[in-house]
Image (cartoon, helix red, strand yellow):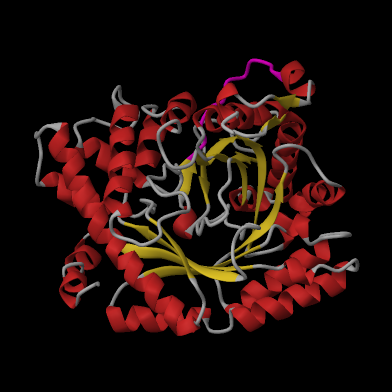
Amino acid sequence: MIETGEILQTMRMIQEENFDIRTITLGINLLDCSDPDGEKCGQRVYDKICRVAKDLVKTGEAIEREFSIPIVNKRISVTPVSLICQADPRPIARWLDKAAAEMGVNFLGGYSALMQKGATLADERLLASIPEVMATTERLCSSVNVGSTRAGINMNAVREMGEIIKKTAELTADRDSLGCAKLVVFANAVEDNPFMAGAFCGVGEPECAINVGVSGPGVVKKALEQVKGQPFDVVAETIKRTAFKITRVGQLVAREASQRLNIPFGIVDLSLAPTPARGDSVAHILTEMGLEMAGAPGTTAALALLNDAVKKGGVMASNHVGGLSGAFIPVSEDIGMIEAAACGALTLEKLEAMTCVCSVGLDMIAIPGDTSAAAISGIIADEAAIGMVNNKTTAVRVIPAAGKKAGDTVEFGGLLGFAPVMPVNTYNNADFIARGGRIPAPLHSLRN
């Protein structure tokens, strides 16, 4: 049982260390909304979301007031649209965006397709529509799963996604190619992720569920300041204890939201999700361990320790832990990552190495606008291979900023922050990407 004393213990974290509940995300199953007519399907989707989520935002705000716990975002995730779409998906996208605005949520995720083994006609229609949809909607997010440990990597989908990301960037060039910030490419995507842009309500999920994402990089850094210079055993134990306290608050919020909305509690995602605010950086946790800057030799080892300790501490604090759970390293959303990338301490290749041991992958990275579609596909393929071989979730959310070159800066605002444009290896990989087909699953996928 969670006691009042435990909550009072978090007040200092909230007031001084940027602790917050990053999101309450309501997952909604839309399989019963399918219709051959896109407009009718969209209307049914809108009606169901408005019925199920009508009290989400006000409930979150009530919990904030009563417990003095900041809940930064209220969000919705839905069944991947390609599973309910039997025609043109663009009308459904418009209805989804309208529902998100009507419900007052920050983002709605699920304009998605699961293509790790191949593509249906609905998948292909959805992919073709992504650039236009990301350019013409405000709150709708899109994701595509192109690989898994069990299925291998769908290189046809990888090739298409490079082209789609380029086109999305061009259509939103007037906003520093912001459309790409709402689009992520996964390997081993999870069904209960509450974080955007990759949230969707998987087919194994219940009719609806409350998933909560917690965050507290500043809290962890502050705790490590008290053990400066001590061995890594002490560092790991300190992070574990801190993650436990953070996750207990997430469990409380999830339970309260579930009871008040009369919707089942799904999971707590205990990820350390940073913001551009100083004092809320995952990179600064790494520097607190003794690195001059994120990207210095030892960075991957430090991140591995952090990710593991967060999971070990958090898993004891909640009945159900899931989602991505660990540490995020988005460049534009983390002031320490921004500074490291700007001075050259952090490169794209080093970030790729770090993704082997963190929660997701290459996230919110601005790259030159003239980066080829094949190069972007190659980045996706590399990251999907890491996920496939290591049986973990990996993702790519890169922004080829139209008209920008390495060293320039892009501005997104809010939690999406800003970022220096990072250089990309310019050696040609077009023949590699043109092959298509599937990269087979690794031998260790045969576990039955």
Q: Residue furthest front?
A: 448
**Is residue 427 rendered magenta in the image?**
yes
Q: Is residue 27 above or below residue 63?
A: above
Where residue 80 sits in the image (x, y, percent)? 70, 57
Where residue 266 sits in the image (x, y, percent)? 48, 65
Q: Is residue 284 above or below residue 50?
A: above
Q: Is residue 218 above or below residue 383?
A: below
**Where does the magenta region start and end?**
420-429
**Is residue 333 rendered magenta in the image?**
no
Tell me, yes or no, if residue 9 can be seen here: yes
Residue drawn at (26%, 53%) of the image: 243
Q: Is residue 126 above or below residue 349?
A: below
Residue drawn at (24%, 66%) of the image: 14
Quarter of the image for residue 251 reads bottom left
Quadrant for the C terminus in the image: top right
204 to the left or right of 241? right
The secondary structure making up most of the magenta span is loop
Tell me, yes or no, if residue 60 can be seen here: no
Quarter of the image for residue 147 reads top right
Where residue 341 sits in the image (x, y, percent)? 41, 33
Where residue 363 sits in the image (x, y, percent)? 51, 42
Quadrant for the N terminus in the image: bottom left
Number of marks in the rendered image: 0
Quarter of the image for residue 88 reads bottom right
Residue drawn at (46%, 60%) of the image: 414
Question: In terms of depth relative to the viewer, which is nearer, 145 or 287?
Answer: 145
380 to the left or right of 298? right
